[in-house]
Amino acid sequence: MLVETGDRTVQRSYTKLLPTHVDADPLVSLTPNHPAPPIIRYGYRSFDRQWIVADVRIGDRLRPPLWEVSSNSNLYLAAMMTDQIGAGPSLTVSGYIPDLHYFCGRGGKDVMPLYRDAKAEEPNITRGLLTKLGRQLSRPAPKPEALAAYVYAVLSSPRVQERFAEALKTPGPRVPMTADAALWDEAVALGTWLLWLHTYAERLQDKAKGRGRYVPFVPGLDWQEPVRTMPETPKDLHYDAETQVLSVGDGRVGGVAPEVWEFTVSGMPVVKKWLAYRTQKGAGKATSSESALDHIRPTAWADEWNDELLELLRVLTLTVEKHAEQASLVDRICDGPLIPASELPKPKDTERKPPKGE
């Protein structure tokens, strides 16, 4: 089933979206012999990876600039740049192209790739900033990943929103830049680990530094009973803080800490929302949309969701265990020597624009 909207018609041809998508002829002209478009991972919401048909002819206004810089070396950072930030992290990350509302399902459309090209040769960083930071810290210019890690260590900490709640009523996160080289190194190390963890160990791997190919196991966190019947609505999801048991329909997961169940991104309860999207009724737009497409829902619990839910719970468990360390780091940075914004270069208008495709 396809629904034509505005200029999205079956008669129109489009520029190909991905190198693997070799055919962008009008849909009306396709035959069974045409190659199928790829189905790939994308970031649906913070900490929620889903799948998409990577075909510009049927996607809802897919953004070519983001797709053109996609690679295993890129990271996509997301924040609330035009709306007030709520409790929780001020910044999240995806290893895959994010949805328009990736940050928390409202706003958060501002996505910042680390690189402006798929080869990861052109950093999406103000020209001269890395060199200036190196001089301020009395060391060589840091790599783009180090700056991303520093920013992530600070802004992914709920402490920022707690400490600057009044200032953050004005939209847009701000990053305190330390002039202390030791604090910089500490933040980069912690931020790199968090970026690795929050991309489900698929980015920034370094086995020698404890960042392997898989999200670490958490003792005691596991399925007690498998899901046999898919939950019909979010009302079929229950959490018992006393026993630390999460019930998903007729399935049960033990060892879920209250802080994990309550973890939010600017008001979005991550675990509850992740599960709600995987009920028969769904959540968000799927529950109220008049489009028949939005009411096509799965009727059975997919086996891979068992592993993916455990991965999510492990990621969040390890995340909340770092909150105290992050909060201490944020406080020490803010209370220590800082680099004034006036001493750092400002981006030019051309640097704020998306890169032009090849």
Image: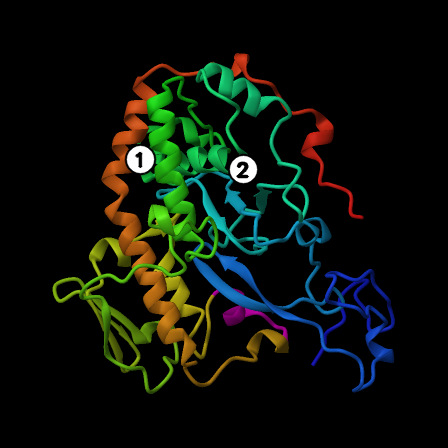
In this picture, is 316 found above or below 297? above
What is the span of residues highlighted in magenta in the rendered image? 284-291
Q: What secondary structure is found at the residue carrying circle 2? A: loop
- Which residue is labeled 2 in the image? 81
Q: Is residue 24 visible?
A: yes
- Which residue is labeled 1 in the image? 159
Screen quadrant of the N terminus: bottom right
Q: Is residue 53 left or right of residue 232?
A: right
Quick one: label 2, few (<14), some, or many (20+) residues within 10 Å? some
- Could you give the CA–CA distance between mark 1 and mark 2, rounded to whole angstroms? 18 Å
Q: Residue at x 42, y 76 (%)?
A: 304
288 in the magenta segment: yes
Which is more N-terminal, label 2 or label 1?
2
Q: Is residue 172 left or right of residue 242?
A: right
Near-viewer residue (272 or 116):
116
Q: Residue at x 49, y 63 (%)?
A: 49
